[in-house]
Image (spheres, helix red, strand yellow):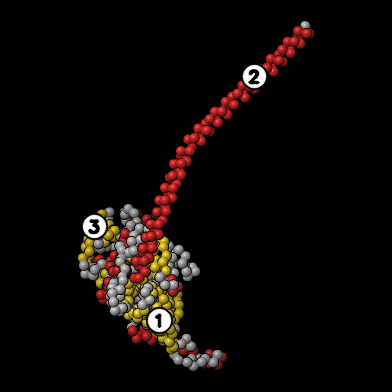
């Protein structure tokens, strides 16, 4: 028994070992087969990859060639724009002579100052010379040059340097502070190269543009960028006519008045301002659309001033809450907040609460759009417009009035809110107080109990700024006062007619 069991045990061990050996051999075989299979698949894949790799290489070369061609085409376009436009861009140097009131005049007869400071005696006024530079664009062969008002406006002497080195004195044809545009003219004695202007309404966000000018006095500087945004307003002054193109093409001091061009070489904007904390370029520049610039320039050349249309309404932007309350869909349009009695809008049947949707066939996006369109409309012409009232669209016609004749209507708002009546500053006052042309409005009458009367204003004092916005006309004053809510405080920068001194005061509107 014992022997038999031993053999049996040994046979079991043998069989077990044999079975284990077979099992291991089976797995080794499978693994080998798998390796062979993988090897075959890898080889097959490598064979298959050779063709795609070659194709991919060819595609890559094609793409590189296409990209190179596009880059070369784009570079050639900018070179062509620069070559074509540079002869039409000018460098402008201005000199302004100012009569400045001696700041010590008010203390000349003050015993306290004489005793402790020995106030020196001197002239009541002294002359000051200011110099500046800018750019401009030649508009026609006769030498009319379009630039900014803040470049040429108020200049006593203007000189123009052409790209070919020619140097000419220039005369001021006209200025328009409301759009910051001006036209000057040189007499070269021969036809001059001039720019072609494009349709700024067709400019699209993302479109490539080129700026040319004299930044920091560096002549014929070319920069490129894109249109970052359109219809920017309330950048400089809420009472001005603004519809800026925003661009990231580099614009610096000295670029003012220079052109912004599309890749066809057409002027689509006049560079005017930058938004910057440093005073230099930070990627945000603003250009006056060419359509607005050409309209203003033609008016200045023809009349020396801009004649603007007037509707006789106070308008504001729609908000979602206001649109819902009036039953309107969306916030496009301009809401009429008030209508001047016997004005053009009142005569045409417009009412408070109407929403203007289109004017002269153009859709109205907001209050600034309507304001700009009315200003550019021909005076005396009947213009069609669409309003939304009580859930219905109504078609109307209005005969555009002349803004210059609307002065009497502006006085009412200012008198009610500030307690004063105002008038334009005279030429004599401009010279006496060393003011720029069209700077400020003079106080003509004062209610002693009104906001300005209580603050010490007198007849003859001149209002220069409100909340840091320059006042150049009675309309400016009316626009800012109308846009300010009841009982809000404003800061008025004014000139004392007795001493010529300037000071800032805070007052509350009625």
Q: Residue at x 39, y 74 (%)?
A: 91
Asked if the residue at tag 1 contacts the one at tag 3, i.e. Cβ–Cβ closer than 8 Å, the answer is no
What is the CA distance from the residue labelled 2 to the residue labelled 3? 97 Å
Q: Residue at x 42, y 51 (%)?
A: 65
Front disc: 1 or 2: 2
- Determine the image quadrant of residue 194: bottom left
Front disc: 2 or 3: 2
Q: Is residue 497 left or right of residue 389?
A: right
Q: Nearer the viewer, residue 451 or 190?
A: 190
Expressed as whole percent of the image width and height from the top left, the position of residue 135 reads 38, 73
Front disc: 3 or 1: 1
What is the CA distance from the residue labelled 1 to the residue labelled 2? 107 Å
Q: Residue at x 28, y 73 (%)?
A: 141
Q: Nearer the viewer, residue 364 or 44?
A: 44
Which element type, helix, strand or loop, lies under badge 2? helix
Locate the C terminus and report the quarter of the image it occupies: bottom left
What is the CA distance from the residue labelled 3 to the residue labelled 1? 54 Å
Locate the N terminus and report the quarter of the image it occupies: top right
Question: How would you rate the neighbour count of disc 3 (Cα within 10 Å): few for under 14, some for 14-19, many for 20 or more?
Answer: some
Question: How would you rate the neighbour count of disc 2 (Cα within 10 Å): few for under 14, some for 14-19, many for 20 or more?
Answer: few
Q: Earlier in the sequence, mark 3 or mark 1?
A: 1
Residue projecting furthest to the right: 2
- Residue 136 in sight in this render: yes
Q: Nearer the viewer, residue 248 or 243?
A: 248
- Which residue does the numbered mark 1 point to in the structure image? 95
Q: Which mark is residue 22?
A: 2
Q: Residue at x 49, y 93 (%)?
A: 121
Expressed as whole percent of the image width and height from the top left, the position of residue 178 reads 34, 72
Residue projecting furthest to the top: 1
Which element type, helix, strand or loop, lies under badge 1? strand
- Residue 508 in sight in this render: no
């Amino acid at each position: 028994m014992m022997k038999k069991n031993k053999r049996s045990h040994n046979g079991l061990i043998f069989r077990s070992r044999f079975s284990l050996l077979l099992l291991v051999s089976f797995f080794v075989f499978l693994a080998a087969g798998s390796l062979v299979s993988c090897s075959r698949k890898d080889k097959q894949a490598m064979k298959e990859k050779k063709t795609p790799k070659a194709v991919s290489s060819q595609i890559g070369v094609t793409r590189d060639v296409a990209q190179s061609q596009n880059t070369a085409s784009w570079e050639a376009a900018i070179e062509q724009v620069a070559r074509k436009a540079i002869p039409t861009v000018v460098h402008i140097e201005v000199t302004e002579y100012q009569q400045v009131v001696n700041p010590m005049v008010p203390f000349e007869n003050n015993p306290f100052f004489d005793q402790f400071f020995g106030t020196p005696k001197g002239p009541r006024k002294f002359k000051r010379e200011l110099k500046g530079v800018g750019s401009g664009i030649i508009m026609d062969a006769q030498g009319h040059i379009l630039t900014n008002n803040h470049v040429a406006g108020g200049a006593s002497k203007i000189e123009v340097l052409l790209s070919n080195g020619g140097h000419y004195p220039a005369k001021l044809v006209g200025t328009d502070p409301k759009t910051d545009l001006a036209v000057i003219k040189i007499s070269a004695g021969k036809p001059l190269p001039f720019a072609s202007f494009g349709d700024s309404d067709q400019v699209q966000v993302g479109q490539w543009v080129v700026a040319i000018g004299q930044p920091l006095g560096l002549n014929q500087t070319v920069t490129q960028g894109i249109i970052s945004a359109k219809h920017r307003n309330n950048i400089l002054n809420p009472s001005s006519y603004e519809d800026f193109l925003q661009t990231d093409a580099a614009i610096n001091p000295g670029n003012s008045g220079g052109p912004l061009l599309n890749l066809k070489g057409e002027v689509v904007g006049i560079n005017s301002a930058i938004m910057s904390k440093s005073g230099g370029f930070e990627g945000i520049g603003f250009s006056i659309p060419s359509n607005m610039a050409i309209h203003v320039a033609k008016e200045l050349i023809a009349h020396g001033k801009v004649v603007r249309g007037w509707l006789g309404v106070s308008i504001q932007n729609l908000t979602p809450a206001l649109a819902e309350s009036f039953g309107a869909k969306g916030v496009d349009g301009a809401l009429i907040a008030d209508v001047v009695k016997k004005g053009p809008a009142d005569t045409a049947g417009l009412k408070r609460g109407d929403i203007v949707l289109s004017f002269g066939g153009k859709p109205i996006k907001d209050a600034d759009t309507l304001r700009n369109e009315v200003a550019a409309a021909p005076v005396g012409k009947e213009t069609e417009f669409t309003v939304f009232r009580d859930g219905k669209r109504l078609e109307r016609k209005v005969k555009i009035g002349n803004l210059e004749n609307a002065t009497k209507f502006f006085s009412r708002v200012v008198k009610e809110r500030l307690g004063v009546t105002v008038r334009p500053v005279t030429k004599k006052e401009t010279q006496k107080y060393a003011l720029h042309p069209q700077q400020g409005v003079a106080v003509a009458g004062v209610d002693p109990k009104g906001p300005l009367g209580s603050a010490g204003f007198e007849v003859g004092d001149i209002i220069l700024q409100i909340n840091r916005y320059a006042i150049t006309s009675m309309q400016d004053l009316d626009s800012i006062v109308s846009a300010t809510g009841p009982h809000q405080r404003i800061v008025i920068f004014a000139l004392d007619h007795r001493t010529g001194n300037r000071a800032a005061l805070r007052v509350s509107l009625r």
